[in-house]
Amino acid sequence: MLQSLQQGKERKEKPTKRVAHLRVSHLKRAIPKSGAKLSKTSIFSIASILPIVALGLSVFSLYVSQSAQKDVARIDVVKTEYGLFDQMASLQLQYPLMSHLFAVTIGQYNSARDQVRGVALAKSDPERLSFLLQERALAHFIFTIYEETYYLWRQAASGERVRAELARDDLMFFNDFLSNNPRLLWYWDTTNGGKLGMAFAGDLQAYYKENVVKGSPADRDPNGPFHP
């Protein structure tokens, strides 16, 4: 009887060992060996994604480059225009007897002209003649700055919007400034004035006539502060 029980126990243990062996074999087949090569399908999938990634990087790089160029263009306009205004401010400090040429309203012009005239009357004729030559040269310089601002606006008008707006604002300032300064109006006048306007291009002359002379509230001053 003891022998029979042992034989029965051996029968029960053998299937259990066989099942365990099958499970281990199945797991070994299911887990790939380390260092196994990728399938052709995986390689094809990665290769097909790479061109899309490269295209995305190229588009992003182009966007960053264009944004940087626009920022540089805006900075260039600001530097150029404020450099011109700095020159005008420096000239005003350097030539205080020419302060009437920098007046931006008729009232400021009249006040500055009277003050300068009070100083000029105490000068000799040769000195007043020297002041007249300086005045004409300085008026020409102001018109040259106006010309540069005009062409900066023309160039920017066909490009980046913010840059064009900056240049336009500066040009509008000059239009208003020149239309309210009686002495500068006389110096530009190509018919009955100082005729400095003839030194500039025809398109600028036409623009000046339309945007400065037309509707100007000021009368031309042919004498200024240096004539007795």
Image (spheres, grey):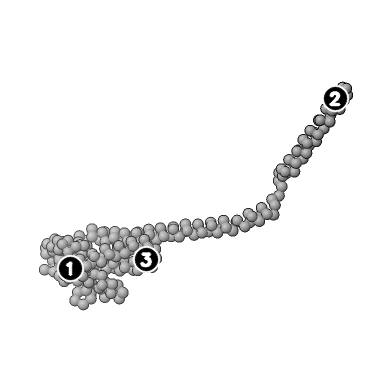
Distance Cα–Cα, label 1 vs label 2: 131 Å
Q: Residue furthest bottom?
A: 191
The percent position of residue 184, horizontal first and vertical second, equals 21, 68
- Residue at left 44%, top 57%? 68
Q: Residue at x 47, y 57 (%)?
A: 64
Q: Which residue is mark 3?
A: 156
Asked which quadrant contains residue 160, the reply is: bottom left
Residue 133 visible somewhere in the drawing: no
* C-beta proximity under 8 Å, tags 1 and 2: no
Give amino acid for label 2.
Leu
Q: Identify the residue shown where x is 20% and y is 66%.
A: 180
Residue at the spot of label 1 = 218
Q: Which is closer to the viewer, label 1 or label 2?
A: 2
Give the mark nearest the N terminus, 1 or 3.
3
- Residue furthest to the top: 2
Q: Mark 1 or mark 2: name the one nearer the start of the chain.
A: 2
* Residue 5: assigned label: 2
In front of the other: 175 or 19: 19
Q: Quadrant of the C terminus?
A: bottom left
Percent across and percent down for residue 111 are 14, 61
Identify the amino acid type marked 3. Ala
> Judging from the image, what secondary structure is the residue with disc 1 in?
loop
Q: Neighbour class for label 3 at 10 Å: few (<14), some, many (≥20)?
A: many
